[in-house]
Each structure stands twice: as C-alpha cells, then as structure tokens.
Image (spheres, grey):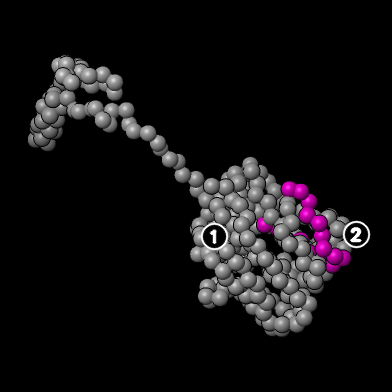
Amino acid sequence: MSIARSVTNHNESSASGSTIAVVLNSIPANSHVVLSVGCLDAQTISGVADDLSVAATGPDKEIDDAGNTLRKAVWHYENYGGGNRTFTVTFSAAVTFRSIVAMAYTGVATSSSKDGIAGQEATGASLTSTNLSPAPSLDGELIVGIGIASSGVPTPVSPLAEVFSNTVDGSDTSDYIQPTHAAFAAQWTQSGASDYGALAVSFFPAASSATVTGAPLLSQAFHPPRQLKGVLSMLMRAMADGLNRTSVTPVTVTIRQRKTLSPTGNHVGGRQRRN
C-alpha cells in the first residue's frame, strides 16, 4: 500500500494567544497525522495534543528563520485511530503569529516511522533544508517540508507539492512521496533575498506484505509412501544406537519408487482407480 495524503486543514492567527487549534474530520483509521506548527520565536512550542488528551510525538525537527523572528516545527502521530479530531498546540506563553497545519496520511509505518531530518537557517532568495540525514532508504517514503521567509510566503520547488501556505507568518508547508529512495533536500524560492528557515522530515512507508494464492499442487492428492514409516523407525533406532556407542554404524536405506497420484492422473500405488 503506497502512502497517500487523505485529509488536511489549517488555522493561523496574528493575534496573541497561548494556544491554537485545528479540526481534522474524517481521518481514516490507522493514519499517520503530521502537524506543522509555528509561532513568533519570542516563545516556545510546549506541545501538541488532541481532544482526547493524547500527546503527539515531537518535535521531529524545529527551526527558526535566520533573523530569529519565526519558529516552525513538525510533530506527528503514528497509527492514529481516526475519526473527527481537534488538535491543539500549546505555547510557553501568549504569542503572536500562531499557526497549525494538520495532515493525515495512509500507508505510513505504524511504529518507528521517522527516518531522516534536515534543517537550515540562512539568507538568500533560494531556500534549502540541506539533504535529509540519513538519506531516505526505502522507496515511497513521505517527506514533509516547511519553509519560512521574512519577505513573504516562499514557493515550493518541484517535486515538493504545497499543502498550505500561511500568509500570517510567511510559511509554506509542502510534502512529497518519493517513488525511488535517494538523497533529498526540500527547496523553495522567494522574490528576493531575505532571512529564511527550511526543514524537512521523512517517514517510512508501511511494510508491504505478500499474498500467496492458489492451492499447493499435491494438497489434494499426495499421501506419504508406505515405506516412510519403516524409514523413520530405522533412523530412530540408529540415533538411539548412536547414543550408546562411540561411533554410529552407517545405515543405508533404499526406497523403491512407486507411482503416486498426479494432480490430473488416476493411479495411486500402482493400482488403477475405479470410477
């Protein structure tokens, strides 16, 4: 099962407050929920929890822009139960430029899902998280990236695909499901050079399972030959004899080949079956 984004939602506010929440409806069962959260860097992100008081894991990666103005981070839930849920970010104190983006995915590993992280604070017209470390090691990994810039909302560079752009804090949250594993850096562009921050987090896909169809060839017709009972008895005697000797007398067993029933034939033990 390949990873797929199912439902998303976001909320942002320039007003001061100590929390911000978002509602995510119709989350599929056993989903992987990723939360992109942020605020003015005057305060810290204390945690993320749902309306059942279940805490998210994180931060997977947190970063400021180079001018130390804005803070962004990624948190996540593994194997999430699904349904309609409200996710709330709590900050260390009242703060402005609060934001949250919630994204639910199917097909992500249900435990130990986080693979690589990357992040950079710099100045320029092109934003890059630098390469994920470790690099993706499985085909089909989910990569979530966040870019923030002091000059406005940056534009993701393909193959990153925008999920939501937050105009309040000048950030963009994007994702990419990488078909073939390879080194990867999340990248964005902006209209002019300014302070920026860029981060990326990758998650493993769920393990694939193989399904065997069809019946074994001999399942309906095969019966052990009569000689097998005698062979096993001889081998057991040889093993028992070996326990009482310093050496074991070799035992040679000869089995005559007899006709057996083929999947389409009608002979068993050399005798013709009467219909």
The residue depicted at 52 percent of the width and 73 percent of the height is: 54
Q: Amino acid at mark 2?
A: Gly
Q: Position of residue 40 (x, y in %)?
A: 76, 75
Q: Quadrant of residue 192?
A: bottom right
Q: Quadrant of residue 213?
A: top left
Q: Position of residue 133 (x, y in %)?
A: 65, 53
Q: What is the magenta range?
A: 144-159
Q: Which mark is residue 28?
A: 1
Q: Which residue is denoted by mark 2 in the rendering?
A: 192
Q: Amino acid at mark 1?
A: Pro
Q: Secondary structure at mark 1?
A: loop
Q: Which mark is residue 193?
A: none
Q: Give the number of callouts.
A: 2
Q: Is residue 15 above or below residue 245?
A: below
Is there any visible trace of residue 130 in the rendered image?
no
Residue 243 falls left or right of residue 171:
left
Q: Secondary structure at mark 2?
A: strand
Instruction: Sort mark 1 into few (<14), some (14-19) or many (20+) by Cα contacts within 10 Å.
Output: some
Q: Position of residue 205 (x, y in %)?
A: 56, 50
| Closer-to-camera residue (217/43) | 217
Is there any visible trace of residue 123 in the rendered image?
yes
**Of marks 1 and 2, the one in the foreground:** 1
Q: Residue furthest right?
A: 192
